[in-house]
Structure formats: structure tokens, C-alpha cells
Amino acid sequence: MPYLLRVQINSSYGSDVDHGGAMGEQGNERIGDISVCLHLRPIFTRLVPHHSRITGLSVGAWSQLDLEIVLDRGPHPDSLAAAISLVPPIEFWANHDTHYPIEFGLRCVQCRQSLSWPQADLFDLDSLER
């Protein structure tokens, strides 16, 4: 069952936030509720709002996802693998196709949700939490 979280989405990046009427404007931020699956929730709550900000949400972005949560930055893949267990239904993914944003991400194949972040702005998750 999804877990409902109240989030702030930075709209200054000009990203297209598909919110289905669940968001309310407040300054430069959009405030609203999103359902993050229980499989992605542990890493989501480690990243947001401590190290990353949500810059966009996409519903039905690609055929294998119902919800993509786009972050402004994220952990280096090696740092991520050392910090959490990537066991099914969670899978790591990387996009190198320049027709789309160059990103890393995690997806839950069971709940059809994903977290993604640009490959250009990475951090070491372990060193930030010391």
C-alpha cells in the first residue's frame, strides 16, 4: 500500500509537474501529497528533504512507470549500493540516451514508481550522514 507524504516541489526549475489537482501554490514552491510506495519510501525519506529536493513529478512518464519523482540531485551509484540493499522489487537504472534527461534512478517494479536524479550532480550518501 502506498504511503502518503506531504512534499514541497521546487517549481523554479520550470519542470512540468503533473499533480492531478492535489497541489496548492505557495510562493515558489508547490505543496501537495504524493503516494510513495513502501519499497521506495526508506530511501526517499533519507534523501528528501535532507539532501535532495523534488523538482518534478511525472504521471505515466514511460510505459513501465505510473509515477516518477524527479530530484534535483542524488547519490552516486556506488554510495547508494553501500547504503541500502537493492533487492527486488527495487532496481537501479541509468539512462545514457541523450534524447532524454541523463539520469540515475531507482524503480519499484511491483508498484511502478521511480526516483530519479541527474547524473551531473551526485553526492556520497554515507559522508553526508556522518
Image: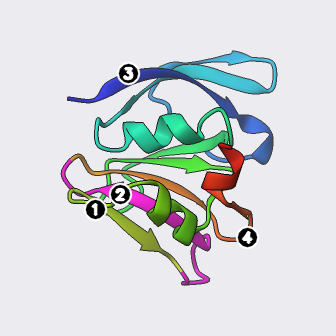
Rendered image coloring scheme = rainbow
Q: Amino acid at mark 3?
A: Leu
Q: At label 1, which amino acid type do we have?
A: Gln
Position of 5 with respect to 51 (left or right) is left
Find numbered disc 1 in the image and state the secondary structure of the residue it sits on.
loop
Q: Which residue position is annotated with label 1?
A: 64
Q: Which residue is mark 3?
A: 4
Q: Which residues are magenta?
A: 96-110
Q: Nearer the viewer, residue 46 or 111?
A: 46
Residue 29 position by quadrant = top right
Label 4 or label 1, whichever comes before in sequence order:
1
* Residue 32 seen from this side: yes
Q: Disc 2 vs disc 1: Cβ atoms closer than 8 Å?
A: yes
The quarter in which the C terminus is drawn is top right
Q: Secondary structure at mark 4?
A: loop
Residue visible at 38% across and 21% down in the picture: 4
Residue pointed to by mark 4: 120
Upstream in sequence: badge 4 or badge 3: 3
